[in-house]
Image (cartoon, coloured by chain):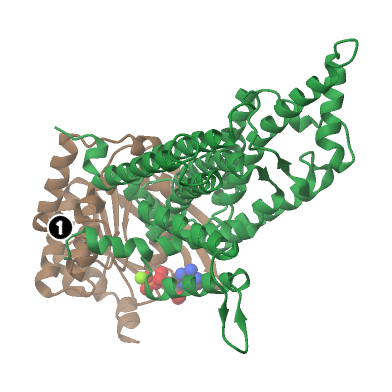
Chain colours: A brown, B green
Amino acid sequence: MNTLLEVSGVSVSFDGFKAINNLSIQIAERELRAVIGPNGAGKTTFMDIVTGKTRPDEGRVIWGEKSVSLLSMSESQIARAGIGRKFQKPTIFEDQSVRDNIAMALKNPRGPFDVLFFRERPADAARIDEIAGEIGLSGEMARPAGELSHGQKQWLEIGMLLAQDPRLLLVDEPAAGMTPAEREHTTDLLKRAAETRAVVVIEHDMEFVRRLNCKVTVLHEGSVLAEGSLDHVTKNQHVIDVYLGR
Amino acid sequence: MRKPFILRHPSVLWFLLALSLLTLGVTILSEGFGLGLISTSFVKTLGKTLCLCLIAVAMDVVWGYCGILSLGHFAFFGIGGYAIGMWLMYARTEQIVAASLSGGPLPPTPQEVTDAVGTQIFGVVGSSEIPLLWSFADSLALQLAMVVLVPGLLALVFGWLAFRSRVTGVYLSILTQAMTLALSLYLFQNDSGLRGNNGLSGLQNIPGYEAVPQSVVAIVFFWASALALGAGYVLFAWVVSGKMGGVIRAIRDNEARVRFLGYDVESYKLFVFTLTAIVAGIAGALYYPQAGIVNPAEIAPIASIYLAVWVAIGGRGRLYGAVIGAAFVSLLSSWFTGGGAPDVPLGFYTIQWTDWWLVLLGLSFVAVTLFFPKGIGGLFDRLVRNPR
Ligand SMILES: Nc1ncnc2c1ncn2[C@@H]1O[C@H](COP(=O)(O)OP(=O)(O)O)[C@@H](O)[C@H]1O
Ligand SMILES: [Mg+2]
């Protein structure tokens, strides 16, 4: 399969501390990938680098069939290029309605004047309803997003990502703080999303990763420790040491 | 199928209705067109208040909706005043000079008129030359264009530099304040070309309309101010409604997240900052002819801070809140500082409101911030909207 995202030889340090150390990861088109690793392994920082929030000290981040470098692009340009991101802690716009949150994320021209003169077309409304159904929030459309439960907020944020229609979706610990039933719904959502686009999921919970049933990358101290199927990596002696040796 | 914007926002209609009734009432009671029950100077005060309401609405959009605490919008207001003031002063002086020179045996040459105008206007700062800044001062159309262009361009350049460098929060406030201070210090200089601390005066006299009594001029400016406030209110209500309003408020609440949605946050901020600066300039251009004088003290940073206080007291993030705050606090302020409020003798000490008003205002600001973060407009909300 074609490579969609190629991160190679990337390093970044904060005040002398190397959070990411010569990291290389490749994500293929329509791939579902889980990234695991102990706390502080650099998982979130990896997403920060891909989405333009953090600039690496060295290395390359190459995107798409035209092989453009993401390092010279702003966060919003990267997002428009087709990379969507869900944060560890749900970040939605609490004083706006669920529907407005989805509508804001919906793939449409993003310039100030496009937005100022924007009029919703029937196709937009249909897409919003479709997404709301998918994330199970059809009945909550008019409510302020701040009133949702924690799990619902996480789904709303995933729904906003789907609305953006990105080619690559980066999801940081989506199941944190969810009940088992909510986790299951989240797994289904992500697996379905990965049918039409690449999805990278950071997760701690092994059960969750097992259900995703996909290739796993183990990060440790800012670089890749092991990569392969979940069974393969959990048999890896380095991985066992890192996880059990703590 | 889709109702027009105004009908979808009944609060805009209510506002326009209230403004129309006020305008009608003031006209009927005025000396210029009505019963003469309210003085011309009070009509001017009310007209000026409407201009302050307009800049407060602009401030609410940039701060209350977009989260940019600009402490520079009064600078744009002042620039609007200077731009129109230059024409008012130049055109009127030119008429006076032409009239006094026409007594001679020969009609005055254009050069003689220009020299005399220069001496008249710039004599106070020890100069008689007309500075380059005044090149277009004889053209009303060009000076009117400057009311819009100068604040707009200044905001565009300043905002571009500041937003592009991701200056936010209190640092941005300090930067806007520095801009205001720099402008006011520049204007204070005698060789600024704008008459230093004398400012521009006699602005209440409209060239070509000397025969029209001030009572009528006052009402005409009151109407113009009401029209500008109404139009500005509708414009901003439209901007902050719908999708644009959603994005702007989202930038206020979490601008990083908005970037990851693919919106270029900087251009949105620039749009809002520049649009509100232009409206502030227009408000100033209507205000100063009613005040009669514009000087650098008007642009001092404290004025922009007052503006923020009005909006906070009125209630951020709701346009009528800004109007209420500006009208209420500025009228109260002129009542207190104008000696309207009776002194309070405490026996050992007498509270003189001219001195203590600022303390009272400061305390109210603190109280509102702590206990009523939604301001006066928040009380309104409770009355108007059905409680949830
Ligand atoms: N902006 C930052 N400034 C300083 N240190 C940071 C910053 N971001 C992350 N770090 C550090 O980098 C390491 C990796 O963090 P992170 O990527 O959040 O780990 P993970 O998501 O895998 O738990 C941690 O030790 C963290 O403290
Ligand atoms: Mg993390």
Which residue occupies the foreground of this view, A42 or B376? B376
Residue at position x 55%, y 59% in the image? B334
Q: How many marks?
A: 1
Q: Chain of mark 1?
A: A
Q: Residue furthest top?
A: B106
Quarter of the rendering occupied by the C terminus of chain B: bottom left
Q: Secondary structure at mark 1?
A: helix
- Image x and y of residue A171, in percent: 28, 60
**Is residue B283 toward the left or the right of residue B323 in the image?**
right
Q: Quadrant of ligand 1?
A: bottom left
Q: Residue A106, how many percent across, how many down?
A: 25, 44
The residue type indicated by label 1 comes to Leu
Q: Is residue B38 visible?
A: yes
User: Residue at horizontal 56%, vertical 41%?
Assistant: B281
| Crowding at mark 1 (Cα within 10 Å: few <14, some 14-19, many 20+) | some
Classify B251 as above or below B346: above
Q: Nearer the viewer, residue B249 or A244?
A: B249
The image quadrant that residue A144 belongs to is bottom left
In the image, residue A22 sits, relative to residue B270, either above or below, namely below
Which of these two is toward me, B331 or B264? B331
In which quadrant is the N terminus of chain B drawn? top left
Q: Is residue B278 above or below residue A226?
A: above
Instruction: Say which of B341 and A118 sits in front.
Output: B341
Q: Position of residue A57 (x, y in %)?
A: 55, 60
Per the image, the residue denoted by label 1 is A189
Q: Is residue B9 left or right of residue B192?
A: left
Disc 1 residue: CB within 8 Å of ligand 2: no
Res. A29 in view: no
Residue B327 falls in image quadrant: bottom left
Q: What residue do we see at 79% from left, 38% from top?
A: B193
| Image position, residue A234 (x, y; %) | 24, 74
